[in-house]
Image: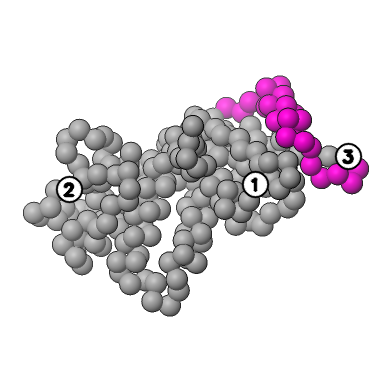
Amino acid sequence: MHADLASAVGDCDLVIGSSARPRDGEYGASLSLAQVPGAIAERAARSIALVFGNEADGLSDSELIHCQAWLHLDTCGPNTSYNLSHAVAITLYGLATAGMVAPASIEPPASRHQVELLYQYWLGSLERFQYFRRTERERFAPQLRRLFNRLDLGEHDVQVLWGMLSQFNVFTFGDRGPLPDGAAHADGATPPLVRPVGDHEPSGNADAHPLS
């Protein structure tokens, strides 16, 4: 059992939610069932989560924001959705009988847990740099999360973005900044590590941040 959706999909490379009604592009790409295999191949996803909401309300915006794309099943007549068991059965049958597309030759995608740590690190660092003087952190946070969802980040991308911000923290405050929950300073026993990306390693501070 998991406490929330974010922790449940933390080890997944691609999370696809379901929706009976149209959503705007801020909640990821709109996919038909036939397009799902291509989306999996495009991201070279190794572990995929399909998320279905309850029959009364479907997925809320706060749940869908943890997904990188959303799936809509075609229906006949005025009804726009199936009951939950039928929706799951149709989706799984469609994927089981689809011709799977060969994965793209790209770097391994970052897991949702890795992206979540990066998101928390950026959010905490932005607050430290007083970015939220003209906007509230709580209002900005969903925008940053949706941005990270759209970027299709790979493991190296996460290292680059973490390393860049880490360097800003070091040269401004003398340390690598606030660590998100679930991350710890390197102690030789918590791989993999995210190290600063650049030509210059600051002296006197060899701490690094783990992805997971």
Image: magenta residue range: 77-102
Q: Residue at x 25, y 58 (%)?
A: 177
Q: Residue visible at 66% across and 57% down? A: 24
- Contact, CB < 8 Å: mark 3 with mark 2? no
Q: Earlier in the sequence, mark 1 or mark 2?
A: 1
Q: Nearer the viewer, residue 157 or 204?
A: 204
Report the side of 173 relative to 110 (left or right).
left
Return the residue at label 2.
207
Residues 99 and 182: in front is 182
**Do residues under tags 1 and 3 come within 8 Å of each other at their CB atoms?**
no
Give the alpha-carbon distance from disc 3 to disc 2, as whole Å: 58 Å
Tag count in the figure? 3
| Label number found at residue 59 | 1
Q: Which mark is residue 147?
A: none
Residue furthest out toward the left: 204
- Locate residue 108 relative to residue 40 in the image: left or right: left
Residue 188: x and y in percent read 17, 35
The picture quadrant where one finds residue 169 is bottom left
- Which is more N-terminal, label 2 or label 3? 3
Disc number placed over residue 76 in the picture, else none: 3
Q: Residues within 10 Å of mark 2 (few under 14, many from 20)?
A: some
**Residue at 61% from the left image edge and 38% from the top image edge:** 51
